[in-house]
Amino acid sequence: MTDPAPLGRADVAHVAALARLSLTDDELERFTGQLARVIEHARDVAALDVGDVLPTSHALPIRNVLRPDEPGPCLERDVVLAQAPETEDGRFKVPRIVGDAP
Amino acid sequence: MSGWETVVGLEVHCELRTRTKLFCSCRNAFGDEPNTNVCPVCLGLPGSLPVLNEQAVELAMRIGAALGAEVRPSTFHRKNYFYPDMPKDYQISQYDEPINVGGHLDLPDGSRVGIVRAHLEEDTGKTSHVGRAGRIHAADYSLVDYNRSGVPLVEIVSEPDIRSAAQARLYAAELQRVLVATGASDGRMEEGSMRVDANVSVRRAGSPVLGTRCEIKNLNSLRSLRAAVEFEAARQVVLLEAGDRVAQETRHWDEQAGRTLAMRSKEEAFDYRYFLEPDLVPLEPDPAWRDRAAAAVGMLPGARRSRLAGLLDAPGPSQADQIEALIDQGLDDLVVVAVAAGAPAALAMARAANELASSMEAAVAMDGGAFAALVVLEGQGRLTATQSKAVLAEMLASGGGDPVAIAAAKGFESLPDDALRDVVGGVIEANPQEWSRLCGGEDKLTGFFTGQVMKATGGKADGKAVAAELRRRRG
Amino acid sequence: MSDAAPLSAVQMAAAVRAGERTAADLVDESLARIGRRDGEVHAFLHVAADEARAAAAEVDVMAAAGRDPGPLAGVPVALKDNLCTRGLPTTCASKILQGWRPPYDATVVERLRAAGAVVVGKTNLDEFAMGSSTENSGFGPTRHPRDPSRVPGGSSGGSAAAVAAGYVPVGLGSDTGGSVRQPAALCGTVGVKPTYGVVSRYGLVAFASSLDQIGPITTCVADAAVVLEVIGGHDPRDSTSLAGPPPRITEALGRGVDGLRVGVCRELVDGTAPDVAARVAEAAEALASSGASVEEVSVPEMRYGLSAYYLIAPAEASSNLARYDGARYGLRVDAEDVAGMNTATRTAGFGAEVKRRIMLGTYALSAGYYDAYYGKAQRVRTLLIDAFARAYARVDVLVGATAPTTAFPLGDRVDDPMAMYMSDVCTIPSNLAGHPAISVPFGEGDDGMPVGVQVLAPALHEERMFQVAAVVERAAHQRSGSPQGGRS
Ligand SMILES: [Mg+2]
Ligand SMILES: [Zn+2]
């Protein structure tokens, strides 16, 4: 098994951007060190040869959990909008959107 | 554009006609007051969890059956990206194990387009942009309504088998008919029930290599689809012929300007970080359910088309158009019933396609037996074409009725045979020169004499009987 | 503690149902104890005094009318603040959710209320349940009730401290990698992580969805059994909820361990502090002298648990926590455009540990690293489940330490995430496998702080696990010379 490259500042800057977090230079430095240590520890797992082992995402084998197509109660709009930072015309107001949904 | 080939693959998002949303029991309805069909689940409130709607699975399997896809055990993934119309900032969608794999769609022109997959996923909310011109890039702010958030979608991805803008339109139109036939969709593009993304590239004719493609997002009418593909292919050819290259990008269709525009995307890497949705479990519909879903698919447009064509000896081009019109209008069953009751097929088709289509609502409610009886009367020559149309108009206006009684009330009875003979004799006497020319072989004068007879009888004469009498007299 | 030992939940409910005590009194006493001490301990983020008094009054009305108010009649409970409560603040100890009041109750909260329990408030936690000391709270740490210079463990440190301080007999926590059991052990209380799917997660604010389970923290095993019976059982709102009736556990408590095979799990003893290891050995001896056959068992794959966990849990968390974007609820920090607003909000609203885990999880899932990290961790999970199955072919339950050490001083591990993560090394394997585990207090360490012994069982064998836990508890009481422990 090939070892993945060690985690560096550029990786942390990249994932911070993907996760919509902004980091100061100091934070970037500190987080890089901390995350690198965790990833370093995870190398025992990364190095394992488990090619023929199936992944487990659900610990228990449940299947076909379905709901009948019957309408149920919705929330009151006032209740929903009361929690919002900003609203207008019964809708959630957000700053302008630059760029489209992918 | 000569020497170039257009290559198109389409991704069609189809909203499913369920009563509730994909993962919650909020109503799946179009046009309600904003943010009234919402709950913790479809608002992505902390702590809420999705539970899969059984009927959405059923409808997805029907779509699979209609497209000849393989219905498979499937799973849901999370597609992670930030966008304010998506309340969880991830979309639950099927990824590497979709419910329907493979299949194809046969188009009315005889071509076949391969289907890659048709998978289940959730719709987003609806964003409206407020401010300068209401346009997305110039907006001051945006407003979000989550009524549509979580509405079930099936995304149908075609192979890049489409070779022209016209064929792209044909594919989308035929898919729309298929979706309606399955009962999965109302096919209303203007309400967003069906939305099309087109992947367009061009290449030198005969080249086996695909060119760089652009994706045109959210085409919401068949007309825009055709126009957008046409424009985009031409744009790419101009670039390539000038020695430039096509940039792989997502583009908008600007309906007003009639052109595609590159979207001003934020400098942002998209990495969806797909992983198996841990809040849902695998879906493995048993064979009995899959069979039930397949059996629930209505008659597909292809089958309807060949059923009508099969009623005719050799359909001509205008009849092919009639067949398309009848299927689109849902009048083909009426024709089949009429023919089974003894009506001549071509006549039944013509009356349904022309007369009934003018008053669709009444036509759809028309009693098959009454329509059949009318076409039979006309076929037997007991009503003339003019009379038949008048009776049909009356039936449509009054919401039905017995064609025999309506004809009698209008005084439509065909001329007795001896009376017809007298009228024909009189017309020949009044036009001796024309008669000798007809007898001399000038066949087109048949029309002249038929017209004269009709005039003399006030339209009561049957055209076929007139022709027969003229032939008899010519000897 | 200055107060006389308060009643257990079972005793309280019995008294209320018999008309000997009123729920109103019990709740007032609970509120009074909170008022006296919680300035120092800081177990609660929000005390819902008015709502609690109103709920207690309802229970009393029911009891007076001769109707049964339920198996937890009048019992004051403390809820970890990542459980949604209708109309009550639910913050996850995060500034990003400050002021948010959910429009709905979590399923467990509904069930507790229906059983007559009275919610007295919401307890502190490591922000979004990410931590092992409750120091990562956005609203200040919780202190150990027995020694305020130490941490109560975490992330359910507030609920564990609330029970240990005698405020309430029952707290609910959530356990993703040990967040119920580890603070229970550090605080000297009982803590249960049920089989994944036994307790509905609906209304539990997600940290790592495939690992999260809600569990009780109580003063005694019998109370934990009753609470689990109340909150467990199928919920159609959670797709991962197991079908079938709620678990039946209480009957098993008196069965003893005669003939049961107990495995002392080497990986849950090696590497723990000597005083902790000594208590585990004593508990094993006690089980042996109660009739169990005890042997040493090794599950070597447990050694990969920590690594697998710190890839899987952050990965799921990075996705679960994306929704805190400032658009619909909670904090918003304004900016020019929506992406800027998302970033400003998340940067201001999340604490350092949450940011670390979001970035770690984003990394583990990102293109190019998925196979090496997340994909690999999921396969290791399979290895671990298989290894457990081999162990359970030999023994009925496994025992070991709950935490490697007793409660540590505040500030000791905050700057060293890896050291903090090691606190969960003994509890993580059960989450990865989806198996149940319970921590039972068993004596003290050299520092006088409580030690917890952990009993692990195969999936859905809660009954057997409680059967063994009850014997461990009895032995612990005998060891400390407490007559019957004064409880249950
Ligand atoms: Mg899609
Ligand atoms: Zn909903």
Image: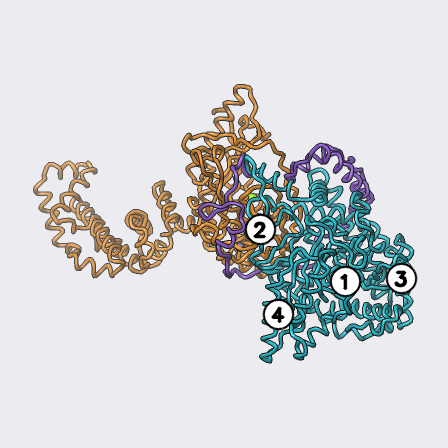
Chain colours: A purple, B orange, C cyan
User: Observer-nearest residue: B163 or C59?
Assistant: C59
Numbered tag placed on residue C56 in the rendering: 4
Residue C325 appearing in the image: yes
Identify the mark nearer the N-term, 4 or 3.
4
User: Observer-nearest residue: B64 or C170?
Assistant: C170
Q: Chain of mark 2?
A: B
Mark 4 vs mark 3, foreground winner is 4
Tell me the distance, in whole angstroms, between the alpha carbons under discs 3 and 2. 45 Å
User: Observer-nearest residue: B325 or B8?
Assistant: B8
Q: Amino acid at mark 1?
A: Ala
Give the image location of residue B64, x and y in percent: 54, 51
Give the image location of residue B313, x and y in percent: 37, 47
- Image label count: 4
User: Which residue is tagged 1?
Assistant: C164
Q: Residue at x 68, y 74 (%)?
A: C13
User: Which residue is tagged 3?
Assistant: C279
Q: Amino acid at mark 2?
A: Gly
Cβ of mark 2 under 8 Å from ligand 2: the answer is no
